[in-house]
């Protein structure tokens, strides 16, 4: 019998739980695919967004013009409100809401691909202004700025949560707008009636600044295992044309240092496409390295007295984390870890900076003008480099002599290593101001450079179709970004060939626009691309994410996928392919080389011998003992810890239901009190029979 009753109780309980879950699903509808603004901190401030612990709840208000935003602040009859606004209006209304947030619960931002704004950048007007080298005149509060369209929102403490819904999830906005039109259209009657509402949950644990959040994390270790923030950081990628491990002090090859950046940033978690901010420059570097490795095989290293050292920095969006760490380690004689580099070894530093911002401006032209920023003195090394590059590639590269350099790793080397006489050159496609109108934002996507993937067949051994053949057969035109990028990479490769060998290149190797096409697809459209499949570990899962990887640097706890992708692509495209199985490959060891067993072009596995390696991209501020986080010497960025971030839409109940529940509860309380009082007064009568009854 007891088992029977227990069974009935369990069935009843499970039925109630199931009914509650169904009821929850009927009341709340998740906003799928949204990304939240989150909190970052530096040595002096907190920046970004956070909701309360329980989330922010607000009545939906669709923002169709600036007047709708002003209505929330000045004339609304209820509230607080969640403003649902498109990217085309966002920059016109966000400061209104931030300046008077008393009736603002949050903002739901959505991208409408058919109404995209002409500019959209939440970065400051002078990115990394406080880590600039001496001679920089850029000031966010002055007249000389690089990012003229920057709003600086990325560096502000925003008093409410903001969520972003991409263009691919327009059905979610349609769902919200349908709910709004049904319940919220009458702005004059929003008291005591059901209203369409949104809840935004993005509670952040960290607050104040980096020093405070690290101190709280350290103290919490004694009480609970919860951290409240982590340092930003990841890994840099480096690769040399020839191995450097066996060089000694008397026989050291001078190097040409060629660098670019991996990362980008935006206001929202997991949404940092970085097309013109970083991807084009990174793809140009990898393509150049791949081309030069075919011109000069590593087996010919004993024939030449010069070397090329390629490096991809990570974390550059946040006060040059990656390049600061490399410059700091060089100053201590510890980078790279094997046969560390000294400043005297570097004869020329070429930074492939921000490229792609002007591609749309020149989409109808074969030409694509470039600019080479250098110091006040045009050193002979730079003159020769630019002459060779323009002659071999038939390019227009205009030198600009100035100490006011655009944001780049050159600032780190000038500040930390006190570089004054080393020839440095920054290659970009802008002059006084950025041509990239979407710098460091969620809208810096492939459309901004007019990229269209061609999906051409890659040979079974990784052979790409030569650019000349693509043009002659009409597979591509010379106005497309793939062709323009390949020409820059080819010109750089031939110029670097001459620096290594001392003579012009006369072979038939060139940079294939087909290879550039495949690489751009990997970083701009999908990680499930042919190149990354071939460059992945043989043991790795082939099911990658449908979309591209976010280029945000992330936290130093683990490596992000973009750095791994870039490193493996360098290994696959520049390394020596050996005929060894995985067991033998894993046991190989030769000074100056690393060995990777990758999937390969036929998905059968290939052993790669390469000089590519990784080094930490974590700011020196987090490895120096008793570092003063207010000193502004190094990057001090951290990211807050959070548990979950989500958004959902629902309809709040009208006031009549709440009033009825209150009245009913009050009446029940009064009746219960009266019955209790009556029983206490008449207890002798009510319970007399049970009290006086004799014992059996």
Image: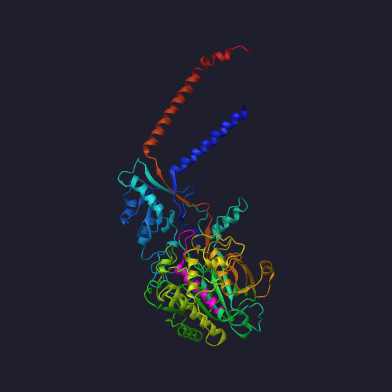
For this view, does 531 lie left or right of residue 179?
A: right
The answer to which quarter of the image holds residue 538 is bottom right
Q: What x and y, as percent, mark residue 425?
A: 49, 79
Which one is in front, 448 or 125?
A: 448
- The quadrant of the picture occupied by the C terminus is top right
Q: Nearer the viewer, residue 233 or 290?
A: 290
**Which quarter of the image is occupied by the N terminus?**
top right
Residue at image coords 53%, 52%: 643
What residue is shown at x 61% (from left), y 53% (from top)?
221
| The magenta segment | 267-293
Residue 273 locus on image (x, y percent): 46, 64
Q: Main secondary structure of the magenta part?
A: helix
Q: Position of residue 557 (x, y in %)?
A: 58, 60
Q: Residue furthest bottom?
A: 503
Residue 377 on image: x %, y % = 47, 84
Does the magenta-highlighted stretch encompass residue 278? yes
Query: Quick check: is 639 in the magenta stretch?
Result: no
Tally the numbered discs: 0
Residue 151 as seen in the image, left or right of residue 246: left
The structure residue drawn at horizontal position 40% and vertical position 44%, both measured from the top left corner, is 651
Residue 676 vertical placement versus 118 (above, below): above
**What is the quadrant of residue 442 in the picture?**
bottom left
């Amino acid at each position: 019998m007891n088992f029977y009753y227990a069974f009935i109780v369990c069935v009843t309980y499970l039925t109630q739980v199931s009914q509650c879950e169904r009821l929850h699903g009927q009341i709340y509808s998740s906003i799928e695919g949204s990304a939240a603004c989150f909190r970052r901190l530096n040595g002096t401030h907190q920046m970004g967004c956070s909701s309360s612990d329980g989330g922010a709840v607000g009545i939906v208000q669709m923002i169709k013009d600036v007047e709708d935003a002003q209505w929330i602040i000045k004339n609304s009859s209820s509230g607080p409100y969640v403003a649902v606004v498109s990217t085309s209006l966002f920059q016109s209304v966000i400061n209104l809401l931030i300046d008077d947030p008393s009736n603002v619960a949050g903002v739901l931002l959505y991208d409408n691909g058919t109404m995209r704004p002409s500019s959209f950048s939440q970065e400051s007007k002078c990115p990394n202004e406080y880590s600039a080298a001496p001679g920089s005149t850029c000031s966010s509060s002055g007249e000389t700025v690089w990012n003229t369209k920057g709003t600086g929102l990325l560096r502000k403490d925003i008093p409410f949560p903001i969520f972003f819904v991409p263009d691919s999830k327009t059905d979610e906005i349609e769902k919200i707008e349908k709910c709004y039109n049904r319940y919220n259209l009458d702005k004059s009657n929003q008291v005591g009636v059901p209203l369409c509402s949104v809840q935004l949950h993005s509670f952040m644990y960290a607050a104040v600044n980096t020093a405070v959040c690290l101190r709280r994390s350290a103290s919490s270790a004694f009480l609970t295992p919860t951290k409240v923030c982590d340092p930003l950081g990841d890994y840099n990628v480096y690769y040399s044309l020839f191995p450097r491990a066996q060089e000694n002090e008397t026989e050291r090859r001078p190097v040409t240092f060629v660098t670019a950046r991996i990362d980008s940033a935006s206001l929202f978690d997991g949404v940092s496409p970085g097309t013109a901010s970083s991807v084009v420059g990174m793809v140009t570097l990898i393509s150049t390295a791949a081309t030069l490795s075919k011109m000069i095989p590593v087996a010919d290293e004993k024939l030449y007295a010069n070397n090329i050292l390629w490096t991809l920095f990570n974390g550059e969006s946040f006060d040059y984390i990656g390049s600061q760490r490399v410059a700091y380690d060089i100053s201590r004689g510890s980078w790279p870890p094997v046969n560390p580099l000294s400043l005297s070894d570097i004869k020329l530093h070429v930074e492939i900076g921000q490229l792609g911002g002007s591609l749309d401006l020149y989409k109808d032209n074969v030409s694509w003008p470039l600019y080479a920023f250098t110091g006040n003195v045009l050193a002979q090394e730079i003159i020769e480099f630019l002459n060779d590059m323009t002659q071999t590639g038939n390019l227009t590269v205009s030198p600009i002599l100035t100490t006011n350099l655009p944001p780049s790793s050159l600032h780190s080397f000038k500040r930390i290593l006190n570089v004054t006489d080393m020839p440095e050159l920054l290659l970009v496609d802008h002059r006084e101001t950025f041509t990239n109108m979407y710098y460091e934002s969620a809208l810096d996507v492939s459309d901004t450079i007019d990229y269209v993937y061609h999906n051409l067949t890659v040979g079974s051994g990784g052979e790409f179709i030569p650019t000349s053949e693509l043009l002659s057969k009409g597979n591509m035109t010379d106005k497309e970004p793939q062709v323009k990028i390949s020409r820059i990479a080819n010109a750089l490769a031939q110029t670097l060939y001459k620096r290594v060998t001392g003579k012009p290149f006369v072979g038939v190797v060139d940079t294939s626009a087909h290879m550039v096409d495949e690489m751009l697809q990997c970083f701009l459209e999908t990680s499930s691309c042919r190149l990354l499949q071939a460059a992945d570990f043989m043991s790795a899962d082939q099911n990658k994410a449908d979309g591209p990887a976010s280029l945000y640097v992330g936290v130093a706890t683990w490596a992000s996928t973009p750095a791994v992708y870039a490193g493996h692509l360098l290994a696959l495209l520049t390394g020596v392919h050996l005929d060894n199985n995985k067991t033998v490959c894993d046991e190989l060891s030769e000074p100056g080389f690393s060995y990777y067993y990758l999937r390969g072009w036929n998905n059968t596995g290939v052993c790669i011998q390469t000089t590519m390696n990784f080094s930490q991209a974590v700011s020196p501020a987090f490895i120096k003992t008793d570092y003063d986080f207010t000193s502004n010497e190094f990057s001090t960025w951290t990211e807050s810890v959070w548990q979950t971030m989500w958004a959902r839409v629902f309809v709040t109940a009208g006031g009549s239901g709440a009033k009825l529940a209150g009245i009913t509860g009050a009446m029940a309380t009064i009746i219960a009190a009266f019955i209790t009082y009556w029983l206490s007064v008449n207890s002798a009568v009510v319970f007399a029979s049970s009290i006086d009854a004799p014992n059996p």
